[in-house]
Amino acid sequence: MATSEEREAVMEDILSSLNVLRRNSWGASAPAKPLDPDWDYEAIVIHNTGHGHIDTMKKIQSFDFSDRGWDDISYHYGITSSGSIMEGRQIIYKGADVKNQNTGKIGVVCIGDFDGGVRGWLSGHGTGGDPITAAMQAAIKRLTVKLRLVFPTMEYFGGHIEYGDTADCPGSHMLPVVASLRKEFGLATPIKRSGL
Ligand SMILES: [Zn+2]
């Protein structure tokens, strides 16, 4: 059982070793309420921001506060198309990114719409979705390698829809990328739990 000092040291090590852009770099607001702790993570969950033009960490946090009623940004890390890794909810706290099953899961949101289709067209994103850049994929890899190192309990790697209910997150174009990375990492396919 890691002490709170040990957890904070691991959190800091992840941020500094990967040059993660910290919360203050994107003007994060403080959590609305004290958050629940979590640790000994066993799963990484990949998301996209989707059709809604919510394309910065600050906008995600504002949406999570106002529309979803959460107490902080729901995801632990964000990844941009240029390959920057951003700090979201601090890793010492439980995420809020998979309905009713957040314990043990690290939420990673890739900024973009990786679905496209009719909904993408309706919202002005185009039917092809946004490109999944090599820099973005490299950042997912760097982050996953580090998270496995610091959390030996890590077992699963998958897209949001592989864990639970969502319309399309992280998008039909991102799912094959996730599957290919999972194979490369040698991590397991999530066990889907719907209707929670
Ligand atoms: Zn999602």
Image (cartoon, helix red, strand yellow):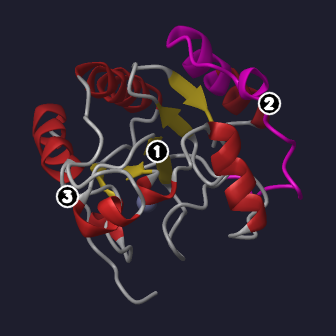
Over which residues does the magenta segment extend? 10-37
The magenta stretch spans residue 173: no
How many angstroms separate mark 1 from mark 3 (CA)?
Answer: 15 Å
Q: Earlier in the sequence, mark 2 or mark 1?
A: 2
In the rendered view, tell whether residue 10 sits above or below residue 46: above
Q: Which quarter of the frame holds ligand 1?
A: bottom left
Q: Earlier in the sequence, mark 2 or mark 3?
A: 2
Crowd band around label 3 with a 10 angstrom C-alpha radius: few (<14), some (14–19), many (20+): some
Q: Residue furthest bottom?
A: 195
Q: Amino acid at mark 3?
A: Ser
How far across and down, in percent of the image, does residue 165 sit?
38, 77
Q: Quadrant of the N terminus?
A: top right
| Viewer-side residue, 143 vs 49 | 49
How many angstroms separate mark 2 from mark 1 (CA)?
Answer: 18 Å
What residue is disc 3 on?
A: 172
Residue 169 is left or right of residue 177, and the answer is right
Q: Which residue is located at x 40 percent, y 26 percent?
A: 143
Residue 73 is left or right of residue 192, and the answer is right
Q: Amino acid at mark 2?
A: Gly
Q: Which residue is located at x 31 percent, y 60 percent?
A: 121
Q: Amino acid at mark 1?
A: Val
The magenta stretch spans residue 33: yes
Q: Which residue is located at x 73 percent, y 36 percent?
A: 3
The quarter holding residue 118 reads bottom left
Nearer the observer, disc 2 or disc 1? 2
Q: Is residue 90 visible?
A: no
What residue is disc 1 on?
A: 109
